[in-house]
């Protein structure tokens, strides 16, 4: 199973990001989507697991704050801000979050904590990133994807 993991699109779906979705069996989005149009576009590619972020206002009221789900034997906990992860993560293999716009991938107590960064408008002079994950027989491999951008001045 192949997953595309992204966050903080802030209303922008870059062509280079959409290209990364072509082989995805599922898409995980960590919030700050900003428009229903982005949700509709992502849903054309694969089943979507999504939470609302702090910038997702009235239009996103029906989206969950956090979500726990299992894909091919791997259990995920998805939330926009890692500060809102509960103290107990019993049974969780991977925590996916966003908010900081900065890619992060680390193991903590046998749980992978993954922030795919932001693949929307460039902010804070950070790389534009997302992640891809391949799951086989309950194990996974993560790949950081750096999305090229036009210029250092791009925002």
Image: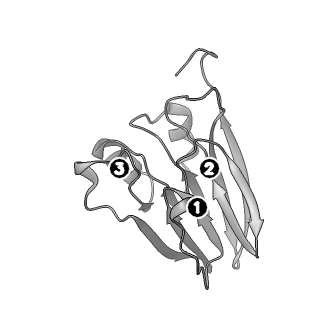
Please tell me which residue lies in front, 24 or 28.
28
Q: Earlier in the sequence, mark 3 or mark 2?
A: 3
Decide which of tag 1 and tag 3 comes sooner along the chain: 3
* Separation (CA) of disc 3 from disc 2: 17 Å
Marks 1 and 2 close (CB-CB < 8 Å): yes
Residue 83 sits in quarter: bottom right
Image side of residue 55 versus residue 139, left or right:
left
The residue pinned by badge 1 equals 96
Q: Position of residue 104 (x, y in %)?
A: 70, 51
Q: How packed is label 1: few (under 14 Cα within 10 Å), some, or many (20 or more)?
A: many
Seen at 60% across and 29% down, the residue is 124
Q: Residues within 10 Å of mark 3 (few under 14, many from 20)?
A: some
Q: What residue sits 43% from the left and 67% below the top?
A: 66
Residues 13 and 114: in front is 114
The reply to whether residue 137 is in sight is yes
Secondary structure beneath label 3: helix
| Residue nearest the observer in this picture, 119 or 123 | 123
Q: Nearer the viewer, residue 16 or 49?
A: 49
Is residue 114 toward the left or the right of residue 59 in the image?
right
Q: Are marks 3 and 2 in contact (CB under 8 Å)?
A: no
Q: Split into 4 quadrants, where in the image is the N terminus?
A: bottom right
Do labels 1 and 3 touch, CB within 8 Å? no
For residue 147, which numbered disc appears in the image?
A: none
Residue at 49%, 43% in the rendered image: 8
- In space, the residues marked 1 and 3 are separated at their CA atoms by 18 Å
Residue marked by disc 2 = 116
Percent x, y for residue 145? 68, 43
The residue where tag 3 is placed is 39
The spot of residue 24 in percent (x, y) is 55, 56
For numbered disc 2, what is the local secondary structure? loop
Camera-near label (3 vs 2) is 2
């Amino acid at each position: 199973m192949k997953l595309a993991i992204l966050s903080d699109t802030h209303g922008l779906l870059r062509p280079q990001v959409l290209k990364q979705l072509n082989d995805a069996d599922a898409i995980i989005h960590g919030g700050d989507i900003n428009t229903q149009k982005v949700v509709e576009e992502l849903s054309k590619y694969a089943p979507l697991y999504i939470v609302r972020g702090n910038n997702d206002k009235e239009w996103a009221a029906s989206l969950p704050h956090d979500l726990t789900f299992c894909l091919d034997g791997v259990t995920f906990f998805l939330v926009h801000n890692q500060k809102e992860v509960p103290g107990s993560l019993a049974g969780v293999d991977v925590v996916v979050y966003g908010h900081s716009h900065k890619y992060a991938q680390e193991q903590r107590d046998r749980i992978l904590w993954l922030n795919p960064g932001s693949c929307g408008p460039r902010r804070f002079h950070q790389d534009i990133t997302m992640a891809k994950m391949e799951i086989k027989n309950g194990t996974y491999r993560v790949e950081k994807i750096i999305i090229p951008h036009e210029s250092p001045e791009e925002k």
